[in-house]
Image: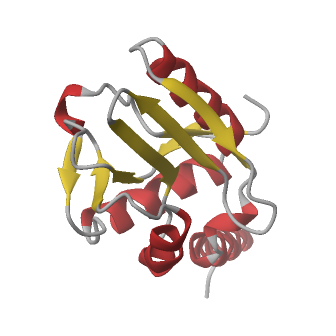
Amino acid sequence: MLSRRAAFSLFVAAALAISFGIKSLAPNDIIPLNAERQHRELVALLAGQGFVAKIEDRPYDWDIVAAERGSCRLKARLQYALDSQASFKYLAPGLPVLKYRYRGTYRDDFPRGRYEIRSRIQSLGLRFGLANAMEVPLLIAASPDCDLAAIDLGPQLLFRLSQ
């Protein structure tokens, strides 16, 4: 038979485990993240490198950062999942180079595995107030004349709306 103190401690531990489990399974879209801030910072970063950059407002889709410098044209947006790559090709016609940039490296495909694990851990940190930002991949469509490795795109950090 457990003492009252032990029974209460066991009950609290079980309640915390259930709460933590539910929060860890909740979708990421319940965390209010500030994508507009990241877009503004990316536009400023590109403008500092000689690009004419702007944010294209997409009322029924995610906004896109568009930039042009000479014959180099590119469009970029934060990419949370693989499923919307096809719609991005539609929004960036004439830009055949399609790359993902995550943690400073370029890839031809969506960064699965480590990104998904890291995203889940960062989401938990945001939910519990242990973190104020999370890193997400950037999907880039560019003209063949762009040397993406020479363009500083900065970190793709999404901050909480309160930050």
Task: Tell whether 100 sits left or right of 23.
Answer: left
Residue 111 is left or right of residue 10, and the answer is left
Left or right: 44, with 147 as reference point: right
Which is more toward the observer, 115 or 97? 97
Most distant residue in the bottom direction: 1
| The one of 2 and 69 positioned closer to us in this rendering | 69
Can the viewer see residue 10 in this picture?
yes
Residue at position x 36%, y 57% from top? 95
Relative depth, front residue between 144 and 155: 144
**Residue 126 percent location from the top left of the image:** 61, 48
The answer to which image quadrant residue 20 occupies is: bottom right
In x, y percent, where is residue 68? 45, 32
Q: How is this picture coloured?
A: secondary structure
Where residue 160 sits, quadrant-wise, is top right
Q: How many marks?
A: 0
User: Residue sitting at 66 percent across and 39 percent down?
Assistant: 55
- Seen in the picture, residue 70 relative to 119 is either above or below; the reply is above
Residue 50 is situated, as x and y percent measured from the top left of the image, at: 42, 14
Q: Which image quarter is the C terminus in? A: top right
Figure check: 5 above or below 46: below
**Residue ID at (28%, 42%):** 103
Q: Is residue 58 above or below residue 155?
A: below
Between 72 and 124, the one lying in front of the other is: 72
Asked where in the image residue 22 lies, by quadrant, the reply is bottom right
Q: Quadrant of the N terminus?
A: bottom right
Residue under the image location 66 percent in, 53 percent down: 127
Kindly tell me whether residue 9 is visible in this rendering. no
> Where does the image place residue 17, in percent across and percent down from the top left?
59, 73
